[in-house]
Image: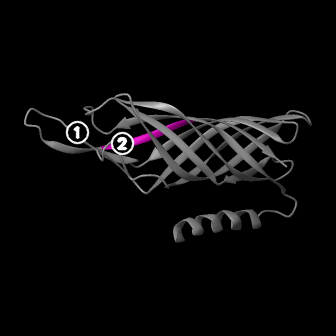
Amino acid sequence: MKKLFGIIMVAVAMFVATPANAQFKFGLKAGLNVSKVSFDKDVAKNAIDSRTGFFVGPMAEFTVPIIGLGADVAVLYDNKGVEVDDVSETLQYIDIPINVKYSIGLGSIAGVYVATGPQFSYNIGGKQIFENEYSLKSSEFSWNVGAGVKLLGHLQVGYNYNIAIGKTGEVDNVVNAANELIKNDVKNNTHQISVAYLF
């Protein structure tokens, strides 16, 4: 909890330190995600398929007028689904993405943006899944790359790709004829489609 509190305080300090003429907006962000699970070794004990999940939570954004440079931060409840041999599990996280954002206006009612930055995720669900064969980490670090459109001064629709930095968890795998078990690191990259409404 201390680490989580520290990250939130850094994000708040970043907003406070911005120029006085920066434009601040607060609102709600939600969307759908599809995770892509991969292994560090070619042989996997089971076939893992991704399922659609969702995320939702508060968001804050600031933008420096004229130059269009700014940042956003959110605290999101993230519900991800994975499936192994037709058995489904739900992964639950609190995600804190902190993105640098560059926006270009296309008149007073529309604009486009690109964004990138780190994301800190905390597992609030089970650490052991699929009959304890899969062990999840309690926290993860990843990187976001995305783009989207701004409409009517309040609505944002975007696409984001979340790239795992380091492993999401581990799974035991039978890898040879001697039935020797080794740890196979798992990474979970995620495609996201989001809608945000800022006041």
At horizontal 66% and vertical 43% (from top left) the residue drawn is: 115
Q: Amino acid at mark 2?
A: Val
Res 173 quadrant in image:
top left
Residue occupying the far bottom of the picture = 2
As displayed, is residue 59 above or below residue 177? Answer: below
Report if the CB atoms under discs 1 and 2 are less than 8 Å apart: no
The residues bearing labels 1 and 2 have C-alpha atoms spaced at a distance of 12 Å
Left/right of residue 32 with respect to residue 13 in the rendered view: left
Any part of residue 17 in sight: no
Residue at numbered disc 2? 186
The verdict on residue 186 being magenta is yes
Question: Which residue does the numbered mark 1 point to in the structure image?
Answer: 173
Q: Identify the secondary structure beneath mark 2.
A: strand
Residue visible at 31% across and 39% down?
40
Of residues 36 and 107, the one nearer the viewer is 36
Q: Residue furthest right?
A: 108
The answer to whether any part of residue 6 appears in the image is: yes
- Identity of the residue drawn at 52% across and 68% down: 3
